[in-house]
Image: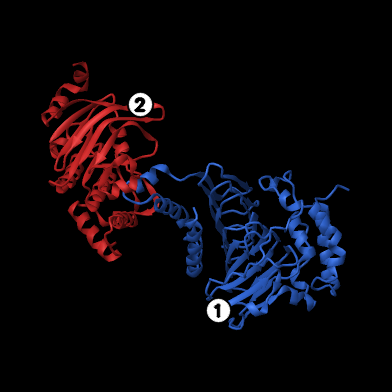
């Protein structure tokens, strides 16, 4: 047997002892699922750079083991800034009832913590372990500790966004969190969800959230995510969404945090007139690395997918965009569009882009575009020559670069919130 | 107003300006003519403060102050306006936002109160009307998808709005039909006053039919080789630059 990476070996060694205290340990079904997850993880290990999907993202800094010595002594929980009556908070990987407000949810919307569901022996909602080559998903299955379980009944619409916060404090005893989230929307249900992943800068930890989403016919999920983890953290997220007929999945990820992050999204368009809209912006500086990897599967005819990702990279920051669009045989009359653009504010910053179109049908409309470049010096001088200071001129151009992708966010409150966060990031450019 | 003394400038490693001397007083309009490659655009960029245009010796005084020590935005706020030969397209920035930001940035620099959106709209509508520019241009991104004529007209609009003390026009006539040329010239002539000055850089004489200069200079190989009044422009038109160089 091959040698595992040091961190993977730690997980394998710890599993027996840890599984006795993880939620649902009394349920044979949950225990079996965890065991199967661990076995799969042990056979896969964390992906190295020889794994094609991980060619641009090197996990060595994580897999050799995280040093936690640089944790700040006292970092407070960041206050919630997004205004909404519905807030669910997880602190250090566990649901915090005292920092949550879930008493005003409309009828037909239910939200619980995964730990509570597993303790109650409700393992059915997890489904079975799938043959999946994603090691971090398998690791999550083995060690999942909590997360949110959101269900919406048929026809239920929730007007105001639900805010779900995952906060890692510096006093955490564990330096890794394996959150498992489950979303099930009934027919024609409509929900807007904002996830925040937050941590205090300087604190090193590993966040490994997995989100499993199933929409029923005609449902719509607006799923927004702010990744503002500590600048010493590792964040490897996987989100899978099943989009059947007439359903719409809209995702927007704004990433500003983590030392190394990867946001992996897989959508399966399994019905006619379904739509997958994946957009995002990543703002990185210092030595941050941000990877966005999407897989869009058009499994039946007549559906659409669209993606726009924009990155701003300063200092030595690195961006990665990998976007795969798969159109199976006979999935005719499908449209798939993809655009990746990166703005490099420093000549040491870089971006790697890999669009991948796998098309097995002939009556389809697909496009992909990728570009990266510096701020337009001609435009900068033009603005300055009219009296606009260099800093303000740069900001105008960066704003303009991001404006069209932020405009894709259909929820106005979230759009404004994300605009505020990007503006704050730019203050430091 | 503007005092250029023995100005030498390089672009990359190449010396383009090789000792320019020029004095422009308030109320005067000077024209600089010259063949392609003489250094006309370089001169305008040096005066506006563009990166990559390095002054190796000489000095430029603007209203008695060392112009070369100022950043491009400071120069603009102190009243220098360069109408570009090739106005830049800026996707994602609406013209109205751009104009208001520039207008208020200059006011702020000079310690004048900034104007609000309503006041600005009123002001800009007056200017577009004067210059026969359609208001919908203000909603479009700066110069994006504009025709050559529209771009030049947009330069004139900006100049009308910002009311500079020193107007620098870099080949404003290129790409303009005769109607657009008249409008551009009209924009400059409206601003002509005893307090203002202008430097018009052009390859052809025709713009000078509409903006009549007080002085005409010929720039060749990085130096002013001849100066005169407006009749010099006509002479050049007739005989060409080659005759002058040969003389």
Q: Which label was assigned to residue A328?
A: none
Chain A shade in the render: blue
Chain B shade in the render: red
The mark closer to the camera, 1 or 2, is 2
> Can residue A256 be seen from the camera position used here?
yes
Characterize the local packing of mark 2: few (<14), some (14-19) or many (20 or more) Cα atoms within 10 angstroms: some
Secondary structure, mark 1, is: loop
Residue B201 x/y as whole percent: 23, 35
Q: Are marks 1 and 2 on the same chain?
A: no
Residue A277 x/y as whole percent: 56, 60
Relative to A199, residue B91 above or below:
above
Give how far apart the Cα atoms at labels 1 and 2 are: 66 Å
Q: Is residue A4 left or right of residue B44?
A: right
Q: Which label was assigned to residue A85?
A: 1
* Outermost residue, top side: B246
Residue A286 x/y as whole percent: 58, 50
Q: Residue at x 72, y 45 (%)?
A: A49
Which chain is mark 2 on?
B
Q: Residue at x 25, y 32 (%)?
A: B5
* Colouring style: by chain
In this view, the residue in front, A20 or B229, is: B229
Residue B148 x/y as whole percent: 29, 42
Characterize the local packing of mark 1: few (<14), some (14-19) or many (20 or more) Cα atoms within 10 angstroms: some
Query: Disc 1, disc 2: CB below 8 Å?
Result: no
Q: Is residue A163 left or right of residue A113?
A: left
> Can residue A215 be seen from the camera position used here?
no
Relative to A36, residue B191 above or below:
above
Q: Quadrant of the C terminus of chain B?
A: top left
In this view, the residue in front, B213 or B21, is: B21
Secondary structure, mark 2, is: strand
Q: Which label was assigned to residue B15?
A: 2
Which quarter of the picture shows residue A189?
bottom right
């Amino acid at each position: 047997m091959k040698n595992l990476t040091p961190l993977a070996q730690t997980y394998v060694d710890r599993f027996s002892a840890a599984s006795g205290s993880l939620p649902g340990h009394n349920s044979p079904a949950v225990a079996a699922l965890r065991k199967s997850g661990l076995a799969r993880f042990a056979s896969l290990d964390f992906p190295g750079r020889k794994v094609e999907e991980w060619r641009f993202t090197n996990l060595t800094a994580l897999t050799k083991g995280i040093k936690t010595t640089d944790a700040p002594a006292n970092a407070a929980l960041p206050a919630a800034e997004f205004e909404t009556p519905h807030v669910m908070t997880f602190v250090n990987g566990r649901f915090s009832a005292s920092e949550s407000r879930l008493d005003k949810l409309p009828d037909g919307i239910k939200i619980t913590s995964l730990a509570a569901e597993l303790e109650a022996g409700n393992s059915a909602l997890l489904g079975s372990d799938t043959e999946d080559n994603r090691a971090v998903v398998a690791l999550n299955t083995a060690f999942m500790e909590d997360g949110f379980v959101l269900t919406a009944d048929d026809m239920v619409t929730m007007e105001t966004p639900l805010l779900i916060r995952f906060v890692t404090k510096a006093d955490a005893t564990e330096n890794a969190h394996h959150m498992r989230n489950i979303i099930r929307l009934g027919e024609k249900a409509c929900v807007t969800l904002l996830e925040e992943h937050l941590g205090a800068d300087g604190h090193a930890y590993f966040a490994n959230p997995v989100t499993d989403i199933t929409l029923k016919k005609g449902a719509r999920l607006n799923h927004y995510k702010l990744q503002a983890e500590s600048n010493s953290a590792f964040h490897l997220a996987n989100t899978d969404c099943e989009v059947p007929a007439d359903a719409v999945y809209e995702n927007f990820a704004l990433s500003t945090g983590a030392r190394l992050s990867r946001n992996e999204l897989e959508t399966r368009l399994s019905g006619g007139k379904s739509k997958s809209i994946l957009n995002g912006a990543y703002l990185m500086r210092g030595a941050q690395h941000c990877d966005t990897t999407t897989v869009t599967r058009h499994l039946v005819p007549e559906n659409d997918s669209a993606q726009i990702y924009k990155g701003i990279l300063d200092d030595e920051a690195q961006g990665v965009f990998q976007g795969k669009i798969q159109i199976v045989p006979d999935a005719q009359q499908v449209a798939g569009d993809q655009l990746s653009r990166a703005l490099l504010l420093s000549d040491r910053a870089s971006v790697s882009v890999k669009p991948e179109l796998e098309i097995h049908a002939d009556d389809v409309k697909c496009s992909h575009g990728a570009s990266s470049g510096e701020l337009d010096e001609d435009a900068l001088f033009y603005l300055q020559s009219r009296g606009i200071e260099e800093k303000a001129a740069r900001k105008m151009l960066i704003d303009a670069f991001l404006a069209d992708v932020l405009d894709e966010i259909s929820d106005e409150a979230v759009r404004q919130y994300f605009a505020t966060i990007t503006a704050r990031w730019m203050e430091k450019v | 107003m503007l005092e250029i003394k023995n100005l030498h400038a390089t672009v990359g490693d190449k010396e383009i300006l090789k000792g320019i001397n020029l004095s422009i007083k308030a109320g005067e309009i000077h024209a600089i003519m010259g063949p392609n490659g003489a250094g006309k655009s370089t001169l305008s960029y040096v005066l506006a403060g563009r990166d990559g245009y390095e002054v190796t010796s000489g000095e430029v005084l603007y209203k008695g102050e060392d112009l070369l020590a100022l950043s491009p935005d400071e120069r603009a706020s102190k009243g220098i306006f360069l109408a570009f030969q090739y106005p830049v397209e800026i996707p994602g920035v609406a013209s109205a936002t751009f104009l208001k930001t520039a207008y208020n940035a200059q006011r702020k620099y000079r310690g004048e109160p900034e104007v609000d959106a309503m006041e600005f709209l009123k002001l800009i509508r007056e200017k577009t009307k004067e210059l026969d520019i359609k208001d919908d241009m203000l909603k479009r991104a700066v110069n994006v998808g504009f025709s050559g004529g529209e771009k030049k007209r947009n330069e004139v609009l900006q100049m009308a709005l910002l009311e500079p003390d020193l107007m620098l026009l870099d080949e404003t006539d290129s790409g303009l039909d005769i109607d657009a040329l008249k409008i551009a010239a009209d924009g400059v002539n409206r601003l002509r006053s005893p307090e203002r000055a202008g430097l018009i850089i052009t390859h052809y004489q025709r713009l000078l039919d509409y903006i009549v200069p007080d002085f005409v200079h010929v720039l060749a190989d990085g130096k002013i080789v001849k100066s005169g009044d407006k009749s010099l422009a006509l002479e050049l038109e007739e005989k060409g630059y080659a005759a002058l160089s040969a003389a």
